[in-house]
Image (cartoon, rainbow, N blue to C red):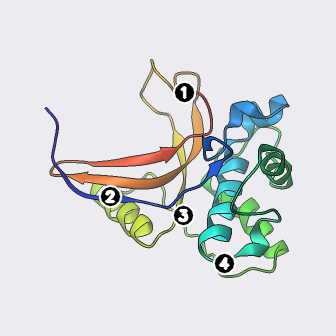
Amino acid sequence: MKQTVLYKKELEYFFVEESYGGNQDLFPDVTMRDGGCGAIAACESCIYFARTNDMRNLYPHPIQEISWNEYHEFAYILCPRPNGIDTLELFMEGFGEYLKDMNDTRLQMEGFHGTHTYEEAVRAVKAQIDAACPIPYLMLKHKNEKGPLEDYIWHWFILAGYEETGNDLLVKAVSYGEY
């Protein structure tokens, strides 16, 4: 039974050529294909804020028509660690260092761990998206043994919107790969 959507909010996201956001599977080396999702989440955040908040210093290429070559080049600046970025703290530390290198203090990160209640998470997601801010999201230990994420123990992606129904909050994610 389809539920009635009470409210819907989606960020004005971007395309890399014909792809909604980037695609981790299209990187030429295995490091980015297998462990680059956290670096790509930071890359996508920079592009989003460069396009929507005039933070041009965060992305060194044209912001209207994003090519795969420029996207890949930039993602390697925020390159992954050899084993990926598997904690919120590592992401915040690495992305914070990039922001510091760019002399930009406008973006402030605050961690939101999975220890919160469902209701607290719903409020946090809605507040962030309503404030026109994408959410870098680390999914750990998912329970979907079959399906698009079956090969992943953990994975980073961007939450870029939500739909609120009477009983649930459904999120729109940019997931960086063929799932």
Front position among marks 4 and 2: 4
Q: Nearer the viewer, mark 3 or mark 1?
A: 1
**Which residue is denoted by mark 2 in the rendering?**
122
Q: Earlier in the sequence, mark 4 or mark 2?
A: 4
Displayed quadrant of residue 89: bottom right
Question: Which residue is drawn at the image coordinates 70% and 46% (left, top)?
Answer: 85
- Describe residue 80's horizontal placement relative to residue 46 as left or right: right
Amino acid type shown at disc 2: Val
**Which mark sits nearer the N-terminus, 4 or 1?**
4
Position above or below: 144 against 159 = above
Relative image position of residue 174 (x, y in whole percent):
54, 45
Gap between marks 3 and 2 measured at Cα: 15 Å
Q: Earlier in the sequence, mark 2 or mark 1?
A: 2
Which quadrant would the N terminus be assigned to in this image? Answer: top left
- Residue carrying label 1: 179
User: Which of the pair 63/163 is nearer the observer?
Assistant: 63
Which tag, 4 or 3, sits closer to the chain's start?
Answer: 4
Q: Residues under labels 4 and 3: Cα distance?
A: 24 Å
Residue behind mark 4: 54
Q: Residue at x 81, y 80 (%)?
A: 103
* Rendered image quadrant of residue 164: bottom left
Circle 3 Cα neighbour tier, 10 Å, few/some/many (<14 / 14–19 / ≥20): few
- Tag 2 and tag 1, C-beta contact below 8 Å: no
Q: Find out whether the residues at labels 4 and 1 contact each other: C-beta distance under 8 Å.
A: no
Q: Residues within 10 Å of mark 2 (few under 14, many from 20)?
A: some
Badge 1 crowding class, 10 Å Cα cut-off, few under 14, some 14 to 19, many 20 or more, is few
Location of mark 3 (residue): 111
Contact check, label 4 and label 3, Cβ < 8 Å: no
Number of the label disc, if any, that sits on residue 21: none
Q: Answer yes or no: do the residues labelled 3 and 1 have beta carbons within 8 Å?
A: no
